[in-house]
Image (tube, rainbow, N blue to C red):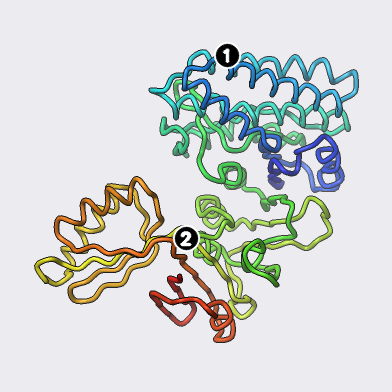
Amino acid sequence: MQVYKFGGASIATAERMQALWPIIETAEQPLILVVSALGKTTNALESIVAAACKGDKNAAMEQAKALERQHVEYAKTILDAKYEDVAIQALNVFFTELQWAIDDAGSHKYDYTYDQVVCIGELLSTRIFAYYLQQQGMPIDWLDIRDVIRTDDTYRDARVDDDYSQQQVREKLLPILQSGRSIITQGFIGSTSDNASTTLGREGSDYTAALLAAWTKAKAVTIWKDVEGLKNADPKKFPNTVRIDAISYDEVIEMAYYGAQVIHPKTIKPLHNNNIPLYVKCFLDKNIKGTVVMNEVSSLFYPPLIVQKGNQVLLKLTAKDFSFITESKLRDLYDIFHKLNIQVNLIQNAAISFVACIDNQRGKLQQLVSLLNKDYNVSDNEDVSLLTIRHYTPEVLTELTKGRHILLEQKTRHTVQLVLM
């Protein structure tokens, strides 16, 4: 048994959804399919949230009607007469749920409203996809993941109740899979004990796939994307990138920590703990080898792994009383960063000074400087970038810093980090 995750780009059009059938048909069965909302649907739902929470319920309803027409037209394009009517009836349940969420929206509960509205995207797409796969003759059941994944009420970044959710998997998923039938369900969403919908935060669909794989002891997870696999750098920022054939869980977590938009660390954790390999493959051509993420990979095979994080601020703090930056002062500084939820991406300290590279969050930066000014003289460089190179070579380092002003540099045997202007 395997878990396949399909993102919004893979089902953005009816033609793309149809093109996924050869991938699914030839896979070892049964499968768990974890599917995102149709491409751009989440953006449209976010716009509905914004309008509803501002009090413009009429605009929100109009946008909801447009989204309804889009999904009905999509269903009519991909389904024959036998499945079209039943699919539209099923979709209407979620259109009604969306209307209720809009009616209940308010500016005082934005995050709650966000989750009640945005979750609808995945429910709509999976309903259509399930009927299409049944139309193709696949033995597959649609499942509302909100009946399985229990979370707390931290809306927009909910934490999963692992024990309860595993029990639901044993009761609801495993009997279906053991009968030889596949399952299609939603990524990104869950629900509280009060049946309020929640979302799981950044890369939530990948996280759902990883959790379900761990709980069902799947052989592997495959994330199907519109790229040929993981690259050693963002091809939008760097020329001549190369695909990575294999990479370790630890290396992916390091890259994500440094700012790479790769696989989120929370997705890696359940896979790493259960030694389940993760494949990143291209839905546009399933024959491309892709990338495998697994426990052990020799670093001898890695090209330089390059991550550039922009919109950074380099802060330099000097103690006003010329006291040393001791452990107690470092603790106090980190308490301030923690209180404002500011991630420190790089630090360096000397006797009476402390340097930190942080994300430039305008409102929070002002609060931070205000707090620090009590005990420190604060200077900063804004609009800088943080360049991290894992497995660097002198040649790559020279090429990527040519013509740049280096404000700060730190090196270890495998990693170099530079703050650049």
In the picture provided, is 9 more to the left or to the right than 27? left
Which of the 4 quarters of the picture holds residue 360?
A: bottom left
- Asked if the residue at tag 1 contacts the one at tag 2, i.e. Cβ–Cβ closer than 8 Å, the answer is no
Residue 147 visible? The answer is no
Residue 58: give its label.
1
Q: Position of residue 18 (x, y in %)?
A: 85, 38
The one of 50 and 331 positioned closer to us in this rendering: 50
Residue lying furthest right in this view? 81
The one of 312 and 117 positioned closer to us in this rendering: 312
Residue at horizontal 53 percent and vertical 26 percent from the top: 49
Residue 397: give its label.
none
Which of the 4 quarters of the picture holds residue 148?
A: top right
Residue lying furthest left in this view? 321
Circle 1 — which element? helix
The one of 52 and 5 positioned closer to us in this rendering: 52
Near mark 1 (Cα within 10 A), the count class, few <14, some 14-19 or many ≥20, is: few
Q: CA distance from mark 2 to mark 1?
A: 42 Å
Circle 2 — which element? helix
Residue lying furthest bottom in this view? 394
The correct choice, above or below, for 174 with respect to 84 in the image is: below
In the picture provided, is 44 more to the left or to the right than 191? right
The one of 153 and 322 positioned closer to us in this rendering: 322
Q: Determine which residue is flagged by label 2.
A: 257
Q: Position of residue 88 (x, y in %)?
A: 77, 17
Residue at horizontal 44 percent and vertical 61 percent from the top: 383
Residue at horizontal 70 percent and vertical 32 percent from the top: 176
Residue at horizontal 68 percent and vertical 50 percent from the top: 223
The correct choice, above or below, for 280 with respect to 327 in the image is: above
